[in-house]
Image (spheres, rainbow, N blue to C red):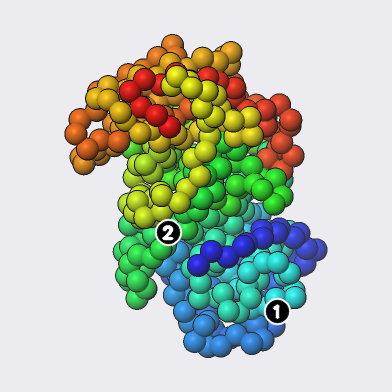
Amino acid sequence: MNVSLLFFLAHQALARPPPSPRQATPPATYSSNPSIGGGANFVAESAHFRVYGMGVSTADAAKSLKIMEAAHQCFVVEQGWRTPGLSTKTGGIGKEVGPWYKMNVYGVKESDIPGAAAQTWTDGAAGLEFLKVVPKYLAEAGVVVHEFGHAMHYSEENWVDQTRTGAWWETLANFIADTFISTPLCTSAKTAAGLPAAGTTLIDLKKVIGDSFQVIVDGTSGSGNYYQAWPFLSYVTNNPDGYPGLGKTALLDMIRKYQIGSNETPLHTLARLLSSASGGSVSVQKVVGRYWARMAYVDIGHAAAAAAFAAQKGSLNYANLDANGGGKYTVKTARAPRYMGANIVPLKASAGTVKIVITTSAATYAATLAVKGSSGVRYVDVVNGNASVTLAGGEEVSLVVANTPVLVLYDAFSIPAELNRGLKYLVQITGATV
């Protein structure tokens, strides 16, 4: 179930928790700390979490604790994220010292967090997070694991108070939630907790593909994509192209190797990771271009998302080009790909060989022909504006044009006009139509 989530960090002047003995390794059961968030109306607890709140049933609390414990096992224990049970005031990554505290989860009235199913709050003095959740969502993994993603991210700390990472917090939290719900990564943790092994992916194809022309992470109120842009994080994590610098630890690396206090964008951090790992042979522009090429058929190593695409592709908006006659097309001004965005254009092949010629004054773009057959998808790069591909029986083809300029420092909640100016291009297509 898709729920509109509102992320909110509130720094409160609460007293630090009372001192307790420090430990070098985490205990099996964390200590309770009712002072974080107020501690009123205790309902239930587990090894790493406590649930409070009026109107919270013991059944919903028990379900929520199962979900939270499975998420803790998957991401903290198995994947190495910093636990929200540790204060940001104590040792950093690899040097953690206790005390370790159970994270508090509070059931609250809808009127207490208007417009949201849940929120992540922070006791700034203690350096600890707590959650506020409308009780009917306590047992919804898409809600509570999303918020747990925020809490882990806050505990990692490097992106905190950096304006240009702001919108990416929601992208990251929905990536964490979807990874938990619909991918194999957390299967063992969920099975151990008695939860179903897999659920429905959170991917919003109407937004990710239908509005693929938007800035890659766009926090514009009412029209942005920052909750839906998480498949890019799936791509860099699954790394189906085997690029050095991407893979299972890529997202944590983007956080932990962020230049502290620089206010750079996550793409700038990723660019450094790629350059260091590949010796400069793989750029962030190449990664973004191939990500969008793979999104033509959602070939990003995410089986549930690919299945959702197969079921929904007939309903998606691909109206990116205007026909000029004679196989010539112009990109629609309103849908021209913006900063690190793309156009995905399915083609109707009329011959065995499809050729395209792209004309643009842009300095940098990445265009690809994605060809899908029964055994998978192959990719043909457009080089110097030209590409051709010979189709085998039953293959289908799409043209993908991504706008991949030099990196820009931008705040996704206040995108500069120049980043919203789309890439203008013409394309001549032979052997197929749009």
Q: Could you say which is closer to the camera, residue 365 or residue 43?
A: 365
Q: Residue at x 50, y 67 (%)?
A: 1
User: Which residue is the extreme one toward the front?
Assistant: 325
Q: Position of residue 181 (x, y in %)?
A: 42, 62
Looking at the picture, does residue 199 appear above or below residue 248?
Answer: below
What SS does tag 2 mark? loop
Image height of 224 relative to 365, above or below = below
Placement of 292 over or under 45, stated as above or below:
above
Residue at the image position 58 percent from the left and 13 percent from the top: 361
For residue 15, say whether it is visible: yes
* Crowd class of label 1 (few under 14; some 14 to 19; many from 20; radius 10 Å): some
> Going by the image, does 202 lie left or right of 424?
left
Three-letter amino acid code at the position of disc 1: Lys
Residue at 35% from the left image edge and 51% from the top image edge: 310
Q: Amino acid at mark 2?
A: Thr
Instruction: Identify the residue under disc 2.
Output: 201
Where residue 428 appears, x then y in whole percent?
44, 18
Badge 2: residue crowd in 10 Å (few <14, some 14–19, many ≥20): many
In this orientation, does residue 238 appear? no
When asked about the image quadrant of residue 337, the answer is top right
Q: Nearer the viewer, residue 272 or 234?
A: 234
Foreground pick, 178 / 315: 315
Q: Position of residue 267 (x, y in %)?
A: 56, 33
Q: Which residue, given by chain and number where applicable, does mark 1 sit on?
A: 109
Q: CA distance from mark 1 to mark 2?
A: 28 Å
Viewer-side residue, 365 vs 198: 365
